[in-house]
Image (cartoon, helix red, strand yellow):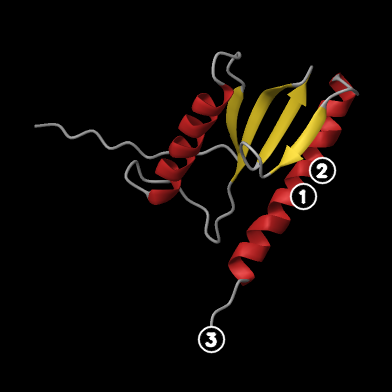
Amino acid sequence: MCSAAGQLSGYLCQCDRALIELARTWFKNPQAELRMECLDDIVIRTEDRPTECVQVKRHKAEGELSPTGADLWRTLNGWCDVVVAIGDSPLPLLRCEPPLQVALRICHY
């Protein structure tokens, strides 16, 4: 039997984060708009253009992401899609919540 509990939990986490982002943004600019699941998990628009794109990350266990991990590369791929979608418009701030910590390992020979 398949379960969508993980996806539902992630989406609810996005909803919680969207409310936080809306409050944070509204105090700076009451005219700003917030959209979910369009260019990114959360998109903040001002003056009819995206000014922030937020990837919401939820992991069961705390820890760093690997430079070769699928979650990191999905995020980067999504941001590449944002760049293509906005064309010549100014690039919005691209960020993750909570901020991603990537463990980079440097090999010394």
Q: Are dots 1 and 3 in contact, CB under 8 Å?
A: no
User: Which residue lies under the disc numbered 2?
Assistant: 19
Depth check, mark 1 against mark 3: the one in front is 3
Residue 1, disc: 3
In this rendering, the answer to whether 102 lies above or below 29 is: below
| Mark 1 Cα shell of 10 Å, populated few (<14), some (14-19), many (≥20) | few
Q: Report if residue 41 is visible in the image.
A: yes
Q: How far is disc 2 from disc 1 in space, using C-alphas?
A: 5 Å
Q: Name the residue under label 1.
A: 16
| Separation (CA) of disc 1 from disc 3 | 28 Å
In the image, residue 61 above or below residue 105: below
Name which residue lies at 42% across and 39% down. Answer: 102
* Residue visible at 61% across and 63% down in the picture: 7
Q: Tell me the mark number nearer the camera, choosing from 2 and 3.
A: 3
Return the x and y of residue 39 as percentages of the image width and height: 62, 36
Q: Where is residue 90 in the image (x, y as percent from the top left)?
A: 60, 13
Q: Nearer the viewer, residue 48 or 95?
A: 48
Disc 1 secondary structure class? helix
Which tag, 2 or 3, sits closer to the chain's start?
A: 3
Local secondary structure at mark 3: loop
Q: How far apart are marks 2 and 3 (CA)?
A: 33 Å
